[in-house]
Structure formats: structure tokens, C-alpha cells
Image (tube, rainbow, N blue to C red):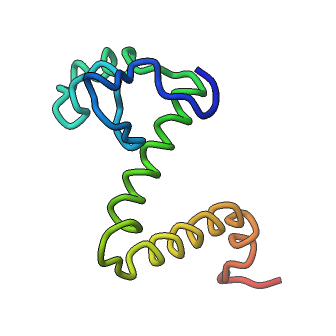
Amino acid sequence: MGLGEYPIEYDRKIHGPYDPSRYYGKPDTPFGQVKLGEVGQWFGRRNKTPRALVGALSRFYWRWNDKYVLAKKTGIAPYVHVCVGSMLFFYIINYGKITKHRNTKYHW
């Protein structure tokens, strides 16, 4: 599977038109239904390759895009998501610099 190709599990005769937000692999138990003792086995069944991570991020993007951006009546939600996400990202990457400017009880 290279860039721009369909996933190996996708079959046009079975699945119909391709949807980039859908996972075409073998279905597994949703994380919310996994019992506490089975969490290790559940994580062991996950595919932990970089290609699987990129595929999961791509599916997440397309689900978000279908729900908030490509809707018939788009509201302000996608813009708020992008703004808040960028604020959190820049806060995290600048956290070390921000903590040096805290007010302390005793000044030098």
C-alpha cells in the first residue's frame, strides 16, 4: 500500500463507495466496552506501526471534517476548534518559558 491507494482491506463490491473516515479492517471491541482486566490484551491487538498511526489520524481528520466543516449548515465550531487547539499547542510548547515568569513570594 503506497500513498494515494486504497487500504488493502477495502473491497468495492462489499463496502460500496470509499469513505476515508471509515476503518475497513477487522472490527474489534470498542475501547469503552473493554473490561479492566482485558485492557492489556486490547492494546496488544492494536497495530502500532507508523502507517497505522497516520491512517488513524487521517480517519480522525475526515470524521471531524465531515461532521463540522462539510455539513450543510456549518457553524462557528470548526473555527473554535482550530483556535483552541492552536492555543493549547503553543501553550504546551512554550510552557518552559511561561513558568520562568511566575510570580513568587520573595523577589531577588
The residue lying toward the viewer, choosing from 5 and 91, is 5
Q: Which residue is drawn at the image coordinates 67% and 78% (left, top)?
A: 102
Q: Which residue is drawn at the image coordinates 25% and 23% (left, top)?
A: 14
Q: Which residue is drawn at the image coordinates 30% and 78% (left, top)?
A: 73
Q: Could you tell whether 103 is left or right of 20 in the image?
A: right
How far across and down, in percent of the image, does residue 31 sit? 25, 33
Q: Is residue 104 above or below residue 9?
A: below
Q: Could you tell whether 41 is left or right of 80 in the image?
A: left
Q: Could you tell whether 54 is left or right of 21 in the image?
A: right
How far across and down, in percent of the image, does residue 81 sit? 45, 70
Q: Which residue is drawn at the image coordinates 46% and 52% (left, top)?
A: 61
The residue lying toward the viewer, choosing from 95 and 99, is 95
How far across and down, in percent of the image, does residue 85 sit? 52, 67
Q: Is residue 88 above or below residue 73?
A: above
**Quarter of the image with the N terminus in it:** top right
Q: Is residue 15 above or below residue 42?
A: below
Q: Could you tell whether 104 is left or right of 23 in the image?
A: right
The residue lying toward the viewer, choosing from 68 and 85, is 68
